[in-house]
Amino acid sequence: MGVSDPESSKLAGRSFVASAIHNLLPKEASESYPDLVVHHTAQPVTEYHNPTFFPGLYPTLFPFGLGGFEIKTRPSALSFKHQAKYLLSISDRSFRYHNSFIFVLLNIVQHRQAHLQTYFTVGKSSFDSVARKLTRVTPSLLECLAVELEQERKLSNPSPEERDALQLLQQVNTLSARIPGSQASKIHVRNEIRNYYGYFGLPHIFFTFNPSPVHSPIFQVMFGDKTVDLSDRFPVMPNGRERALRLAKDPVAAANFYEFSFRALFRFLLGWDFDSHRSVAAGGIFGFIRAF
């Protein structure tokens, strides 16, 4: 094996194709053809409404090339997010144990939300004013503005261009407000909390709920360990290294453990009915909850 023109700037594309085809041909009559030939094209594969996208991307997870996303021939329509949640919840844990499948799912969900939110924002009546501001913003202006904000300096007399740039930064927050995990989504949640203060008043109790799956026997059972006996007062569990490896291997079980712990705490200790969205008749250890 040798390397020629690693920068791909001297040889034409057809030369590479011709060389690849030549290598596929058997040198002697006794030699057989390769077991697998992967064809490439210059056109990128679309991820929207393409049922063959994930089966082609992960042939080990979809060995028969079936079960892709957004299949139009399904009797009932199934959204991308619902099917992704289903594949991560079935008894066959190959999907959740895969090294990259769950990250690709999240990435697609994130930029689909960005595309959708971009459509709503651009479709507003302020599109013309935003377009004019974009044409007046220069890289040097943004760099100067970034330095001022980084050093926490107050802009006493901002120029019209600087005001336009600051307003565009607010538009960027609006664009990404519904993207899971983005900084703007966190700001959106904080604003919701402040709205609770305005409507219900200041909370009587504030605490951070942070259950640790590594030290919990419940998580070990959710992971699939049948040797952990939850009826024991102090269940026997694997060593710390094994528990950490289990957490890294199955983040879906960790998310299920958090949801289970959160609901159990509010249902059985604090007396919240998730079906009726109010406190139970008997209340909880702190009485009746109005909101949280």
Image (cartoon, grey):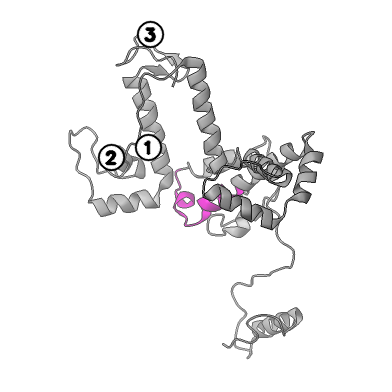
Residue that numbered label 1 is attached to: 257
Does residue 230 appear left or right of residue 17 in this picture? left
The secondary element bearing badge 1 is classed as: helix
Cα distance between the residues tagged 2 and 1: 9 Å
Q: Position of residue 242 (x, y in %)?
A: 28, 53
Residue that numbered label 3 is attached to: 281
Residue range corresponding to the magenta coloring? 91-108
Magenta span has 155? no
> Looking at the image, do the residues carrying marks 2 and 1 touch, with CB atoms under 8 Å apart?
yes
Residue that numbered label 2 is attached to: 216
Q: Tell which of 146 and 25 is nearer to you.
A: 146
User: Which amino acid lies under the numbered mark 2 shown in the image of this protein?
Assistant: Ser
Q: Position of residue 20 (x, y in %)?
A: 67, 81
Q: Residues within 10 Å of mark 1 (few under 14, many from 20)?
A: many
Give above or below for 227 relative to 277: below
Point out which mark residue 1 bears. Answer: none
Q: Quadrant of residue 180?
A: top right
Residue at 39% from the left image edge and 42% from the top image edge: 254
The secondary element bearing badge 3 is classed as: loop
